[in-house]
Amino acid sequence: NGMLVDTDDGEDVKLKDVHVLKSMFNNFHVRGAGSVSFVSCTAKGSVHGRGFDAGGSVTISADSCTSSGNRRHGFGVTDSASVTMKKSLLSGNMQTGLGLWKNATAEVTRSRICDNGIEGLYAASDYAGTFENCRIENNKRNGANLQERTNIIMNGCDITGNANSGLLAYG
């Protein structure tokens, strides 16, 4: 991993203008029970992993961040982690721009999720989140793939130019 941020003791970590490029696995690997704030950070070109990888009960905020050209996901959130993202770009990742699994939650505002290899947004079971004034566009398969029991609110989002479905939802 490029940068491991472990908040097991409930710490609050603030990172500004940190750029992690071409790590062998995840560029930013975040775990624990605290909070991590990213401002104007870049995760680019992870060889085998994710740009940002968050898990555990950690709370993440990402403001004006970019995650692009990663082998897997631009931003992967799992295991009850939560992310608040605004004015960010998730682009050109080999799989998804934003992937959410296992009780992960997200609030995404004024962000762009585009040109990813499979989906812009992939949300698996037991996910809850809101997307406001976002653009989800030009992804190679679906703009947003929402699996069963997914609870999501989209307000003022443009979903356009995706190869298969703009919004694919399972019941």
Image: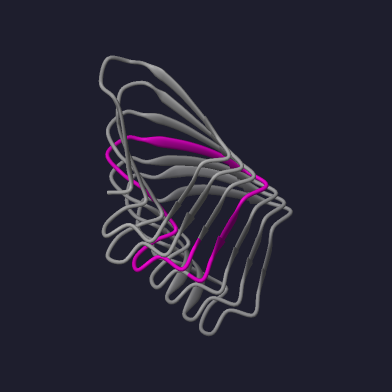
Left or right position of 142 against 110: left
* 126 to 157, vertically: above or below: above
- For the point 39% across and 45% down, which residue is it? 127
* 61 to 78, vertically: above or below: above
Rendering coords of residue 162 (x, y %)? 58, 79
Indicate yes or no whether the magenta region holds residue 115: no
Classify residue 169 by image quadrant: bottom left
Rendering coords of residue 150 (x, y %)? 41, 51
Q: Nearer the viewer, residue 24 or 89?
A: 24
- For the point 58% across and 40% down, which residue is it? 17
Count all numbered tags in the image, as a single digit.
0
Left or right position of 38 against 27: right
Classify residue 86 by image quadrant: top right
- For the point 33% across and 57% down, which residue is it? 23
Q: Nearer the viewer, residue 37 or 4?
A: 4
Q: What colour scheme governs how the chains and residues are painted in the rendered image of this protein? A: one colour
Classify residue 119 by image quadrant: bottom left
Q: Residue furthest bottom?
A: 163
Rendering coords of residue 33 (x, y %)? 31, 22
Left or right position of 107 against 145: right
Rendering coords of residue 16 (x, y %)? 57, 34
* 39 to 125, vertically: above or below: above
Indicate yes or no whether the magenta region holds residue 89: yes
- For the point 74% across and 54% down, which residue is it? 156
Quick one: quadrant of the C terminus? bottom left
Looking at the rendering, the stretch of residues picked out in magenta corresponds to 68-92
